[in-house]
Amino acid sequence: MLDSVRRIVDLGLVGGASGNVSRRIAGPDGDLMAITASRVPYHRFSLADVLVVDFDIEPVAGEGVPSSESLLHAAIYRARPDAGAVIHTHSVHASAFAVAGAPVPAVLDEQAVTLGGAVEVAAYAASATEELARNAVAALGERAAVLLRHHGVAGVGRDLEDAVAVVELVERVARIAILARALGPVPGLPEDALRAEQQAYRMLHGLRG
């Protein structure tokens, strides 16, 4: 958890106390999640700021208030058994797409294989609400990332290292797409290539279809 927090800070995907990180903890009585505490500036974030809660956001271990977006993380874990970690960022270029209400288009082969295609935009809902969580899950589908309208990004991984790679790639693709649009129209990946790469993504994540 600490390494992942430091990594997204170093990558410039979050700042101040924005964003949050969690990982699933499998247990005999039901899964739990370790999640970052709310409103703790990253420059002083420590192990004491990693809390453990259940999917109803009831405390299990640690002192403090869990992230205000805990409902979002729990909803994704419930909907996606393949998800071992979730990271929410406020990265600049991806957030620009979220503000514009425009999906990050599928323009790179790596994107289709790693993220499952375009990064769609969830319908707007206020932060830290069940509605936001529901909207995010609906727009996420089986893909690895979703844009939160007027907010930021949520990325899903099999583990924390995978989730960091997802949110890093979302930001990189968003930046490439914006730069490419400055040069002219931006075509998406050819449909046959996109379908093949999405199938590779499904196989990698053990998804049907």
Image: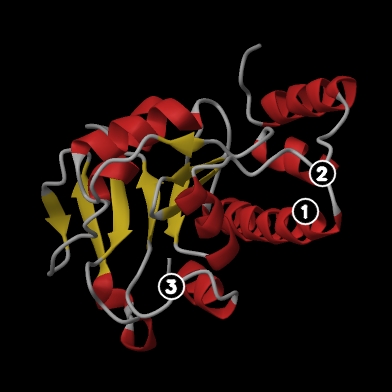
The one of 70 and 104 positioned closer to us in this rendering: 104
- Distance Cα–Cα, label 2 vs label 1: 6 Å
Q: Residue at x 55, y 51 (%)?
A: 97
Question: Label 2 neighbourhood size at 10 Å, few (<14), some (14-19), many (20+)?
Answer: some
Q: Amino acid at mark 3?
A: Leu
Report the quarter where the N terminus lies: bottom left
Which residue is the site of mark 3?
2
Question: Label 3 neighbourhood size at 10 Å, few (<14), some (14-19), many (20+)?
Answer: few
Q: Earlier in the sequence, mark 3 or mark 1?
A: 3
Numbered badge on residue 186: 2
Q: Are marks 2 and 1 in contact (CB under 8 Å)?
A: yes
Q: Amino acid at mark 1?
A: Arg
Q: Amino acid at mark 2?
A: Val
The image quadrant that residue 90 belongs to is bottom left
- Distance Cα–Cα, label 3 vs label 1: 36 Å
In-image side of 62 versus 20 (left or right): left
In-image side of 179 versus 145 (left or right): right
Is residue 80 among what the camera can see? no
Numbered badge on residue 181: 1
